[in-house]
Image: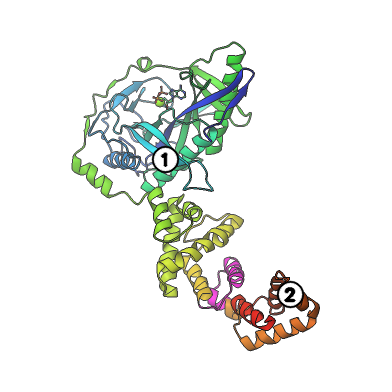
């Protein structure tokens, strides 16, 4: 994966990527005001006098946003700065009534950390790469301008103005679109586990500025461009590809890459120059005189650490070692906090209902959820959660497979009917007569018929054509309409065939 190269007329080029991810902090109120952060409200309903920048208003920092930033920093294995400070970043724009954004340039709340990404999704225990984090700081979001509603008018919506963001800046450690994608996916997973950001990229709660440069292997870093506000993982990867290609062609044509801010146009599949890159001095940063520095106590940080849940890597390893799941199954079930929560709710209930220890339930349940329930979630377009696919139904059905009432195939049939009708699984089994039979007399009678009707094949089997065993199993199951206990069928067939 690290050998990703862009081919040019003068040979291969290496791509260097660094990402600045803006993640909206999960909080009911904004960073410096009590206004609501609810998404989708009527324009300009979530606006306090502070957000509208009325003269004389004073910002008061929202402690919950600070706590969430610290928890996130800890989850990224990062250094927490006990002393940090807010600065004003001055610029004029119609979506920024203050005329400055309150951010943290010089003294961010979180310093260096790292994220480990897996390079092969099919082999999560295989090769990994550690991507460095430069810093994480807290800042205000801006509002939204709409220019396309009316030919001569522009509208401003300040609902988003002043909402708390975490800006998470990576080191220029990524070398391919796939690595960039894996990094964003892992970061989003960690944020969701921590609960500090919902990671919803379509709604803009998480977006990435994609920094890209190219160089010949062994050269020093090239000049980067920054493509702003990319709002899906697919687009991040697309931007890397487009920018790398553009820069290589430009350099090979005798041009030079200029450090600039670019825009991504997904409809036309291109990036376009937006403005030349500004430097810190263009913004006349200075400490915000309305806000005291943030001083954290060791106890505050210790409590934040205590409050962290088990994180995805630790959970995946525990599913493998303590529950005996395969690396792949463990990775699928822990990739998202919601999926892991769902699996664990099912595990507890199924173990209780089947009266078996977790270790005996874990594997069949993992199979069941990954193939059957996730399959139904995909087919119906309903998210995988306890409301849409209640653990009690899964527990009922699985308990019936453990006690021999249902075969795996019948269990799937019952589940399909359950998803459609919502009827109680036990009732479905009763009413549709889906019970599997272990009645040896009945099965033996069917086997006798089948062997008699296929005397030639019985001879071949006895002559060494072992593969025919599957044929006899299939015929028996068919004759019994799929309801015979496969284990019993196997045993009785072996006996009958000698
Ligand atoms: P700014 O706000 O000016 O964009 P930041 O320090 O916030 O600066 O972010 C710079 C981002 O650009 C970081 O993610 C960093 O890893 C990345 N970066 C720096 N140099 C390069 C380079 N030569 N090629 C690609 N990415 C780079
Ligand atoms: Mg930046």
Residue 256 location (% of width, % of height): 54, 12
The residue that mark 2 highlights is 461
Drawn side of residue 427 relative to residue 156, left or right: right
Which range of residues does the magenta coloring cover?
403-428
Residue at coordinates 42% horizontally, 66% vertically from top-left? 359
Drawn side of residue 233 relative to residue 316, left or right: right
Badge 2 marks a residue whose secondary structure is helix
Q: Nearer the viewer, mark 2 or mark 1?
A: 2
User: Which comes sooner in the sequence, label 2 or label 1?
Assistant: 1
Residue 322 location (% of width, % of height): 39, 60
Is disc 2 surrounded by few (<14), some (14 to 19) or many (20+) residues within 10 Å?
A: some
Marks 2 and 1 sit apart, C-alpha to C-alpha, by 54 Å
Q: How many marks?
A: 2
* Residue 90 magenta: no
Residue 93 location (% of width, % of height): 43, 22
The residue that mark 1 highlights is 116
Drawn side of residue 281 relative to residue 329, left or right: left
Badge 1 marks a residue whose secondary structure is strand
In the image, 76 versus 163, the foreground residue is 76
**Is residue 476 among what the camera can see?**
yes
User: Against 284, is 388 above or below?
Assistant: below
Dividing the picture into quarters, in which one does residue 51 lie?
top left
């Amino acid at each position: 994966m690290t050998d990703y190269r862009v081919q040019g007329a003068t040979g291969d080029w290496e791509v260097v990527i660094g990402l600045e991810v803006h993640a909206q902090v999960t909080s009911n109120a904004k960073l410096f005001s009590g206004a609501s952060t609810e998404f989708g409200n009527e324009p300009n309903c979530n606006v306090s006098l502070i957000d509208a920048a009325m003269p004389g208003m004073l910002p008061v920092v929202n402690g919950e946003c600070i706590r969430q930033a610290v928890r996130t920093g800890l989850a990224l294995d990062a250094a927490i700065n006990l002393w940090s400070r807010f600065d004003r970043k001055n610029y004029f724009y119609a979506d920024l009534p203050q005329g400055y954004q309150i951010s943290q340039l010089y003294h961010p709340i979180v310093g260096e950390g790292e994220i480990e990404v897996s390079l092969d999704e099919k082999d999560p225990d295989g090769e990994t790469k550690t991507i460095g984090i430069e810093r994480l700081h807290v800042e205000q979001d801006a509002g939204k301008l709409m220019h396309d509603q009316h030919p001569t008018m522009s509208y401003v919506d300040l609902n988003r103005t002043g909402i708390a963001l975490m800006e998470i800046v990576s080191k220029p450690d990524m070398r391919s679109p796939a690595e960039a994608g894996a990094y964003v996916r892992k970061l989003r997973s960690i944020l969701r586990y921590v609960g500090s950001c919902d990671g919803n990229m379509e709604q803009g709660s998480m977006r990435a500025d994609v920094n890209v440069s190219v160089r010949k292997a062994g050269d020093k870093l090239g000049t980067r461009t920054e493509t702003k506000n990319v709002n899906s993982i697919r687009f991040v990867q697309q931007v890397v590809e487009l920018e790398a290609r553009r820069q290589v062609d430009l350099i090979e044509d005798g041009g030079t890459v200029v450090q600039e801010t670019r825009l991504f146009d997904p409809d036309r599949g291109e990036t376009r120059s937006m403005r030349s890159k500004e430097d810190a001095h263009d913004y006349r940063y200075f400490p915000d005189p309305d806000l005291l520095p943030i001083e954290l106590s060791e106890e505050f940080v210790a409590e934040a650490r205590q409050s962290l849940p088990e994180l995805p890597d630790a959970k995946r390893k525990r599913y493998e070692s303590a529950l005996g799941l395969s690396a792949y199954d463990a990775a699928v079930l822990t990739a998202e906090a919601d999926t892991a929560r769902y699996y664990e709710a099912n595990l507890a209930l199924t173990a209780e209902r089947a009266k078996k220890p977790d270790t005996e339930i874990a594997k069949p349940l993992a199979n069941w959820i990954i193939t059957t329930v996730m399959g139904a979630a995909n087919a119906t377009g309903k998210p995988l959660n306890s409301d849409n696919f209640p653990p009690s139904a899964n527990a009922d059905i699985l308990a019936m497979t453990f006690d021999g009432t249902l075969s795996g195939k019948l269990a799937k049939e019952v589940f399909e009917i359950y998803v459609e009708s919502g009827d109680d699984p036990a009732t479905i089994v009763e009413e549709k007569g889906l019970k599997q039979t272990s009645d040896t007399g009945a099965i033996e009678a069917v086997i006798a018929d089948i062997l008699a009707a296929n005397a030639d094949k019985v001879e071949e089997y006895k002559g060494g054509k072992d593969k025919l065993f599957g044929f006899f199993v299939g015929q028996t199951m068919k004759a019994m309409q799929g309801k015979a206990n496969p284990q019993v069928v196997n045993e009785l067939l072996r006996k009958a065939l000698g």
